[in-house]
Amino acid sequence: SNQTPLHLAAENGCDSTVEILLKTGVEKDPRDYWKKTPLHLAAENGCDSTVEILLKSGVEKDPGDDWNRTPLHYAAKNGCDSTVEILLKTGVEKDPRDYLYRTPLHLAAENRRDSTVGILMKAGVEKDPRDE
């Protein structure tokens, strides 16, 4: 899967390990086989404090993976509401498009994440985005 120790620590919300690795100068935005960064994995799993640590360290906020999905796509898809809020507060792109031209709002709606849909709408995302 081509993951680094930072990927694994971020995916599992191991904040102290993430901090140690970052302090030692590891690459902040390594890409795994699917071009996911540690931020993707932390956001996908709703690891809020890990997401905050990574963002404060200066990682790329809107990296696209092989499907052109950003961390916001994954947090919205999985209904990680507080993670979605954290990402939105840091100024991430609200309406990034994936390979099917879908936004985080599409993924939240498709996966029945009602509260996430509400958070995204309140944040001012595009109301009627069309996919391809």
Image (cartoon, helix red, strand yellow):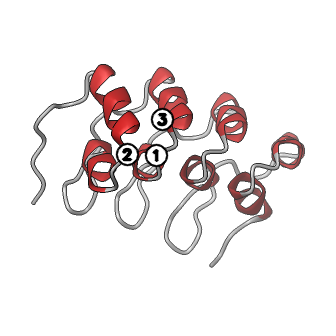
Query: Is residue 40 toward the left or the right of residue 126 in the image?
Result: right
- Count of numbered badges drawn on the protein: 3
Q: Is residue 85 above or below residue 70?
A: above
Q: Is residue 79 above or below residue 128?
A: below
Neighbours of disc 3 within 10 Å: few (<14), some (14-19), many (20+): many
Q: Earlier in the sequence, mark 2 or mark 3?
A: 3
In the rendered image, which quarter contains the N terminus?
bottom right
* Residue 72 x %, y %: 43, 43
The residue wearing badge 1 is: 79
Q: Measure the C-alpha gap from mark 1 to mark 2.
A: 5 Å
Query: Is residue 50 toward the left or the right of residue 46 in the image?
Result: right
Q: Residue 113 has which mark?
A: 2
Q: Kindly identify the residue that appears in the image at 40 percent across and 52 percent down.
A: 77
Task: State the residue in front, 55 or 84.
Answer: 84
Q: Measure the C-alpha gap from mark 3 to mark 1.
A: 8 Å
The residue wearing badge 3 is: 84
Labelled pair 3, 1 in contact (Cβ < 8 Å): no
Labelled pair 1, 2 in contact (Cβ < 8 Å): yes
Neighbours of disc 2 within 10 Å: few (<14), some (14-19), many (20+): some
* Residue 12 x %, y %: 74, 56
Amino acid type of disc 1?
Answer: Gly
In the rendered image, which quarter contains the C terminus?
bottom left
Q: Earlier in the sequence, mark 1 or mark 2?
A: 1
Amino acid type of disc 2?
Answer: Arg
